[in-house]
Amino acid sequence: MKTKKSQKLYKKALTLMPGGVNSPVRAFKAVGGNPLFIAKAKGSKIYDVDGNEYIDYVLSWGPLILGHAHPAVVKALKKAVERGTSYGAPTELEIELAKLVKKAFPSIEKIRMVNSGTEATMSAIRLARGFTKRDKVIKFEGCYHGHVDGLLVSAGSGGATFGIPDSLGVPVSYTKETIVLPFNDIEAFRATLKEHGKEIACVILEPVIGNMGCILPRQEFLEALREETEKYEIVLIFDEVMTGFRVSFGGAQSYFGIKPDLTCLGKVIGGGLPVGAYGGKKEIMSFVAPEGGVYQAGTLSGNPLAVSAGIETLKILSKASTYKKLDKIMQHLEEGLKDAAKRAGIKVKFYRAGTMFCTYFTETDVIDARTAKTSDTEKFKKFFWGMLERGVYIAPSQFEAGFISLAHTQKDIEKTVKAAYEVFKKL
């Protein structure tokens, strides 16, 4: 595997950007070594500047569920860009995308487009506070909701704690209204509501945690969240930026049968372009400006390029055959990786939710952030580089989800499983 050009570019990037990257995980700090610089991508493959080809299971961190440069998306983008890149004014395209999202997510009665997942979660929390006239927020350890000051927090000691800033530059005063609880812990949640229920504006969570690998919720945990938030008149927010259209066509809420008050979306609904959205009950969304007093705005929100790519993506996903094909691809990968680990005599825990997955190097059942951290990160580093050398590109962190697309073929899966077996044997 040649990396000379990537290394040269990285040295140059280090003089221009913090860490040489525009998003931390790209720097490969969790696995050591230098990042690859990508030149192009098509279908299930990406190609770096040194000419190496890789089967891609990162897929721009989730949005490319159709694969890279899908012909329908490329055609729509070319058509859109010829008409102008942005107007700062309403378009018919926004209505079309909103209708497609609403069809997939019945809980979304009204929707507001934004430009990123971070914007979506930040705006949804502000809306929940404006609607309830309360300040406190509950989040769960291991769930990432973007780089919002009030959510960049980690738990202190004890079952229910007020947030401690997890980043420099975040004042303690910004996180003192955030309560961090363990994921899947019903008792801790109920105890917290018993003490602070009338002060809490909203509960926000990734219904399947994709920013700690792939941690599945207990059905009874989600049911308890819905039951208790209704009792205390707290807004329940599902952050489906990652799980939306990934766990199922209607997201995790459809798969698990839980209807949140507000939903945050992103990734897939932009078809690979920057996008985000939040929506939910009419009575809550009516508080958003200009209809209500909760202010939120964005010049590029609902821009014609992102919306055009999103429309084409959702049209294909809405076909009955699409998820059958995706599930078949994912099932083959799951069975193959489990079998490869077993034959190689390596202990792993494999989890998947729809087209999201993660292989943890641990013998412990992963049910929350604490158990995820039992994973052997040194083994993962070796696994990552072994796979990369064999032409398979996975997330450069043990604690990130992997993804498949419609473009992945049986040949891709077979090559991936073969590579995994070879690397597992060396571990």
Image: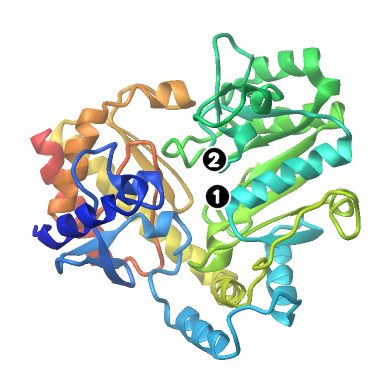
Residue 322 is labelled as none
- Residue at the image point whose x is 59% and y is 48% from the top: 118
Mark 2 and mark 1 in contact (Cβ < 8 Å)? yes
Residue bearing mark 2: 208
> Few, some or many C-alpha atoms within 10 Å of disc 2 (few <14, some 14-19, many ≥20)?
many
- Whether residue 254 is visible here, answered yes or no, is no
Q: Quadrant of the N terminus?
A: bottom left
Residue bearing mark 1: 243
Q: In this view, does 94 lie to the left or right of 326?
A: right
Q: Note whether 352 is above or below 77 in the view shown.
A: above
- Residue at the image point whose x is 38% and y is 70% from the top: 68
Name the element at disc 2.
loop
Q: Could you say where residue 335 lies in the image, as x and y percent from the top left?
A: 30, 47
Q: Quadrant of the C terminus?
A: top left
Which sits in the foreground, 412 or 162?
Answer: 162
Q: Could you say where residue 354 lies in the image, as x and y percent from the top left?
A: 48, 51
In the displayed orientation, state which residue is furthest to the top.
158
Earlier-in-chain disc, 1 versus 2: 2
Name the residue type under label 2.
Answer: Val
- Residue at the image point whose x is 10% and y is 59% from the top: 4
